[in-house]
Image (cartoon, helix red, strand yellow):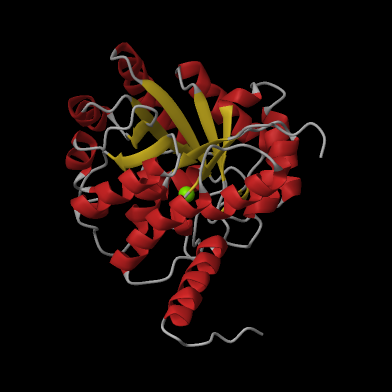
Amino acid sequence: MADLPKRVKIVEVGPRDGLQNEPEPIPTNIKLSFIDALAHSGLQHIEATAFVHPKAIPQLADAIDVAKNLPPHPCVEYSALVPNQRGLDRALESGIRRIAVFTAASDEFAKKNINMSVEESLAVFQPVIASAITGGMTVRGYVSTSFVCPYAGEISKERVLDVAKRLIDMGCDEVAISDTIGAAAPSDIDRTVGHVLQFVPAAQIALHLHDTYGTALANVLAGLQLGISNFDSSAGGLGGCPYAKGAAGNLATEDLVYFLDRMGIESGVRLNDVAMASMLISDQLKRELPSKQLKRLNAARRANGNQQNGESPNSN
Ligand code: MG
């Protein structure tokens, strides 16, 4: 296929976006082993945690412990979500060098998710982004519900551009256009992201996709065709959204890596090694994760084990 990016950057969001949606907190040492395994798979951008109020997201109450003990990998850039000045102070204290701020294209969603209108959240972020940059950090911005909002319905492309542009003007070097409930189809990507790209360089745009309706990889292709080379994914397909009922699963890193490998697009990430990291967390959660590639590899592993035990697997 002509003119697709030759190389793609993957931002792994499993440790933050994935684990914050699990009903039970994961022990800090397991999180750190998970992050270490992800770093060993070739992932170079890992969103490790969030400095949010522990009462809002108890699953990430150990943010400082996680951030201070991140496994040292010289090629890996760790980041953390920061909602306000207090969060930024904790991030600075922990030695994190990259933060992400989080707003939406829909006021209804922003109010339910972060208890502020979009406008109010941008007013909060402006000084936070400025002092982060002064402190030597880099900043990413998220625009949630960029296509469909569970409360407000269809989102206009002009609105997404407006919020993305303002985050960039405030100092974000990258904005993740996010399909928070996974409702978008390639035509939505084409319309909205295509519009944003008329005013913002592709290098500053990432796509954060969910696979709720099974459209995530089709949307990756639509993004690639627009020149986007920056995609978020979550090991095993961990995650969902506590504020958007039924929105289960970020695009799985394994599924994205298989897709890119098969398309001849370099990501630097090794599928089998991501799956090892996912198995570690899947064992801890005592449930199977939704990634198709992970399921395939697990089935192969079980079949292998059975063969070694002298059992013959059903092969139809
Ligand atoms: Mg997500």
Image spot of residue 16 (x, y percent): 35, 46
- Image vertical order of residue 81 relative to residue 147, above or below: above
Residue plotted at (30% across, 16% down): 131
Q: Quadrant of residue 165?
A: top right
Residue plotted at (38% across, 41% down): 39
Observer able to see residue 254: yes
Q: Nearer the viewer, residue 11 or 249?
A: 11
Q: Nearer the viewer, residue 97 or 258?
A: 258
Image spot of residue 258 (x, y percent): 61, 52
Residue found at the far top of this picture: 134
Q: Nearer the viewer, residue 161 or 78?
A: 78
Q: Is residue 266 left or right of residue 80?
A: right
- Image vertical order of residue 144 relative to residue 90, above or below: below
Q: Is residue 231 left or right of residue 95?
A: right
Q: Quadrant of the N terminus?
A: top right
Image label count? 0
Q: Nearer the viewer, residue 254 or 177?
A: 254
Image spot of residue 26 (x, y percent): 24, 58
